Image (cartoon, coloured by chain):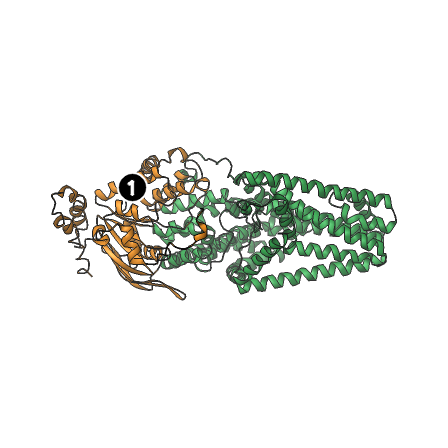
């Protein structure tokens, strides 16, 4: 178990060695968080923020996740991409203690989340996809609720709620009921609820869906700053371009398996991430179809 | 085009059966029951029609008017009950409005209420089988009435759609709707009692009841609701002027509602639904008042929901009506039945929590992802109910004892009430962690019963009720002995046992529920996810 996470250690190294060009200033980016991460979990020597081993989940006849192994290095900005129904949400739910796996284990900074959910969940901030919010609360009340549920004290919650609403451009709607929010605003308030306790690992399922470009840029800045300070972010997304620009690591998931995982540069192997993704997953239709749709 | 709408509607109906066997069985049972009721009504009216056509005509007019009124008004309260052919869904298809109107109107008949109304309309005409001319008039009138029902209900819902789209308005209307629904039973009991006593004085038809019906029907026949149903009666009497006038009323009504619908639909198709002005609340509300702990936070959230979510506040709105219902059903204030006021209220409030996690729906994910422990979750849900429930129950206990003038029973009533609220909450703590069943989703009408799990719901509710009953039995027996035997000393025993046993059970129930919760909160989340 402790050995397994070793491979990711050299991860920053390729960036250094691949830095045949003297573009070393880039390296400190991914490298920098490492000392912080290594210092923080002083107890163990697990550099993995999330370590997933042999995860299986079956729903009736359908095997949603068929033996996934993943290591999310501490301090990385990790993207998870895959076609619809690939098992991304199922995997993330199991990794965050919200769906019990049939087999397999999940460790968050060395804590087995299924053996010790209370401690594991303390380290995690989760933005689930496809769930409702307590939408009869106002935006400010919802974020406060999330903070208080985490056992934080009133003053800290009030201060951070204020900061979060400002940062996510929701201050003007703080007293509006969440049920009256637009889809993008709902996503943002859910994000605020997920990060109010300053978790060490953030797991965000489709965080940019329906979010306007300006808010998306703001969220990206917040997340990058968080990663730069030693935090770890896992996002799932359909938007390859976004993942390629934003993340330093990526896993391609399809039909319940991991097809490729590693640094973005390793995975895309010189191609654009989108092309590489299509190559890995397959299933592109020939563009000859639908001839009648051509307007001329 | 019209045929396509009908086919669409039939396909939608058929598809809903494919989703669940139980739903199909429920539908068949409902259809058989509906047919049975229709059959009884038709047979009754046919028999009555051959003996006393005047009375039959009056009853048809009154009943028919109620049906039309129901068609027009009920959809306003029970929003979202049947939106399968919401005109908004046809906005993107290029379709002439006339076609859309005709299609939607015809499809409106192809629904359970539509078919039942059609059968009733045709069936009631059999009441006139002795006079063929009146029979024809009854069929024409029945079809006219059916058209008025369907078009009128579309007209009211479409014309008022801008209002109905406002969440605030919908919620107020929904809570208001609890009042008539609660009072239907007592109203019938009251009318029945009045008519019953009248019958005793004037024997036979044509007497008290008959003249009351005839007088009422005479007025209602001139209203847009009663006119089509009253055509046959006019023909039977040979009053052709009257028939013509009622026919005009009926046709003008149909024309007016058609135009209203046409206009409203035209407006609705070019103005997409908006959610209206967003409501605001100042500050943190209950979150500032409850302690800043996980338990306090859950309690503050639940308190907010009890006041803001119609699915909860509907239960609160019902509470002031319970004394009224008991007074009427118990036949007056002096009755012992009225002493059940406080225990009954206590039970209703405690039972309301029995599927509380299902009411959260998938928002419950926040509790799972934050890792709230079971103790905080359970007590957080119980505390608000205790906070407003105990004062209400105490007040009701004193009021009921005062009204029934049985002050000697006060300790017993208090003991049973407090024992009931604590015990039923204790059972709810366990059942809402173990026996979930689908409930109306957040934002849905509280009257909209979720489909497809009627059996599971029934079993879960029966089990919870049975447990509540068994566990309150000791204090119930003591209380009953104190009240009926009259043995006031036992009343004090009931009070002590009610409070002591009840609180012990509540602590035990919350602890047990918390343990179940801690063990299976991810499973609970997955279960509510399937209710989507």
In the image, the chain rendered in orange is: A
Horizontal side, residue A155 vs residue B103: left or right? left
- Looking at the rendered structure, the secondary structure element under dot 1 is helix
Residue located at (82% from left, 52% from top)? B55
How far across and down, in percent of the image, does residue B108 sit? 64, 51
Any part of residue B405 in sight? no
- Name above or below for residue B156 compared with residue B49: above
The quadrant holding residue B519 is: bottom left
Any part of residue B488 in sight? yes
> What residue sits right under mark 1 in the picture?
A220
Total numbered labels: 1
The residue lying furthest to the front in this view is A296
User: Chain B takes which shade in the image?
Assistant: green
How far across and down, in percent of the image, does residue A275 sit? 28, 52
How far across and down, in percent of the image, does residue B329 sit? 67, 52
- Name above or below for residue A79 compared with residue B289: below
Horizontal side, residue A66 vs residue B116: left or right? left
Horizontal side, residue A80 vs residue B256: left or right? left
Q: Nearer the viewer, residue B420 or B11?
A: B11
Q: Nearer the viewer, residue A9 or A178?
A: A9
How far across and down, in percent of the image, does residue B237 sit? 87, 49
Residue located at (62% from left, 63% from top)? B29
The quadrant holding residue B241 is: top right
Q: Chain of mark 1?
A: A
The residue lying furthest to the bottom in this view is A61
Label 1: how many Cα within 10 Å (few below 14, some 14–19, many 20+): some
Horizontal side, residue B425 vs residue A232: left or right? right
């Amino acid at each position: 178990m402790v050995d397994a996470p070793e491979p990711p250690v050299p991860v920053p190294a390729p960036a250094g060695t691949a830095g045949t060009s003297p573009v070393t200033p880039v390296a400190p980016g991914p490298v920098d968080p490492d000392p912080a991460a290594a210092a923080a979990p002083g107890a163990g020597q697990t550099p993995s923020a999330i370590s997933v081993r042999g995860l299986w989940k079956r729903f009736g006849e359908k095997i949603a996740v068929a033996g996934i192994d993943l290591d999310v290095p501490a301090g990385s900005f990790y993207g998870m991409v895959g076609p619809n129904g690939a098992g991304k949400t199922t995997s993330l739910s199991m990794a965050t203690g919200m769906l019990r796996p049939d087999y397999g284990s999940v460790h968050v900074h060395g804590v087995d989340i299924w053996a010790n959910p209370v401690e594991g969940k303390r380290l995690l901030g989760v933005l689930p996809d496809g769930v409702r919010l307590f939408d009869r609360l106002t935006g400010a009340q919802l974020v406060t609720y999330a903070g208080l549920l985490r056992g934080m004290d009133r003053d800290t919650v009030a201060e951070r709620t204020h900061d979060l609403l400002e940062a996510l451009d929701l201050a003007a709607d703080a007293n509006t009921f969440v049920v009256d929010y637009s889809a993008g605003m709902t996503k943002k308030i859910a994000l605020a609820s997920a990060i109010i306790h300053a978790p060490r690992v953030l797991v965000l399922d489709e965080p940019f869906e329906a979010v306007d470009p300006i808010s998306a840029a703001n969220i990206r800045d917040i997340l990058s700053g968080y990663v730069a300070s030693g935090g770890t972010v896992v996002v799932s997304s359909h938007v390859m371009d976004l993942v390629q620009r934003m993340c330093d690591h990526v896993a391609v998931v399809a039909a319940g398996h991991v097809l490729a995982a590693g640094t973005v540069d390793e995975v895309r192997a010189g191609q654009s991430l989108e092309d590489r993704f299509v190559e890995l997953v397959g299933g592109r239709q020939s563009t000859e179809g639908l001839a009648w749709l051509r307007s001329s | 085009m019209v045929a396509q709408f009908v086919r669409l509607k039939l396909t939608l109906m058929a598809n809903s059966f494919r989703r669940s066997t139980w739903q199909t069985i429920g539908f068949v049972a409902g259809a058989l029951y509906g047919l049975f009721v229709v059959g009884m009504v038709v047979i009754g009216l046919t028999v009555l029609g051959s003996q006393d056509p005047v009375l039959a005509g009056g009853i048809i007019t009154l009943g028919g008017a109620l049906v039309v009124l129901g068609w027009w008004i009920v959809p306003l309260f029970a929003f979202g009950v049947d939106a399968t052919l919401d005109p908004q869904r046809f906005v993107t298809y290029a379709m002439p409005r006339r076609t859309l109107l005709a299609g939607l109107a015809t499809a409106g008949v192809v629904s359970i209420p539509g078919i039942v109304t059609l059968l009733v309309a045709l069936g009631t005409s059999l009441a006139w089988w002795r006079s063929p001319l009146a029979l024809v008039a009854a069929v024409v009138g029945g079809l006219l009435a059916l058209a008025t029902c369907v078009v009128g209900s579309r007209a009211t819902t479409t014309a008022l759609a801008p209002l109905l789209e406002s969440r605030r308005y919908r919620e107020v209307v929904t809570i208001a709707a609890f009042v008539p629904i609660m009072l239907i039973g007592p109203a019938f009991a009251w009318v029945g009692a009045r008519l019953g006593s009248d019958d005793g004085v004037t024997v036979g038809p044509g007497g008290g009841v008959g003249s009351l019906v005839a007088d009422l029907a005479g007025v209602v026949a001139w209203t847009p609701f009663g006119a089509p149903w009253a055509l046959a009666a006019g023909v039977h009497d040979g009053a052709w002027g009257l028939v013509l006038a009622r026919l005009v009323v009926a046709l003008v009504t149909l024309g007016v509602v058609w135009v209203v619908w046409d206009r409203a639909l035209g407006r609705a198709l070019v103005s997409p639904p908006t959610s209206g002005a967003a409501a605001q609340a100042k500050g943190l509300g209950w979150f500032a008042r409850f302690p800043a702990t996980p338990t306090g936070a859950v309690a503050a959230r639940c308190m907010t929901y009890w006041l803001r979510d119609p699915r909860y506040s509907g239960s609160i709105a019902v509470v002031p009506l319970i004394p009224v219902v008991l007074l009427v059903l118990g036949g007056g204030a002096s009755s012992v039945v009225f002493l059940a006021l406080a225990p009954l209220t206590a039970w209703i409030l405690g039972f309301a929590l029995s599927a509380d996690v299902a009411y959260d729906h998938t928002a419950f994910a926040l509790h799972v992802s934050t890792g709230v422990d079971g103790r905080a979750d359970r007590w957080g849900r119980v505390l608000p109910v205790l906070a407003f429930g105990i004062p209400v129950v105490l007040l009701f206990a004193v009021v009921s004892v005062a009204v029934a003038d049985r002050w000697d029973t006060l300790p017993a009533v208090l003991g049973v009430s407090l024992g009931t609220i604590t015990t039923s909450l204790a059972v709810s703590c366990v059942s809402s962690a173990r026996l979930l069943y689908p409930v109306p989703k957040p934002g849905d009408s509280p009257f909209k019963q979720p489909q497809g799990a009627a059996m599971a719901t029934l079993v879960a509710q029966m089990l919870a009720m049975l447990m509540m009953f068994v566990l309150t039995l000791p204090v119930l027996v003591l209380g009953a002995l104190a009240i009926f035997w009259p043995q006031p000393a036992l009343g004090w025993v009931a009070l002590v046992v009610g409070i002591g046993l009840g609180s012990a059970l509540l602590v035990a129930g919350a602890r047990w529920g918390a343990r179940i919760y801690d063990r299976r909160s991810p499973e609970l989340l997955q279960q509510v996810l399937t209710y989507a």
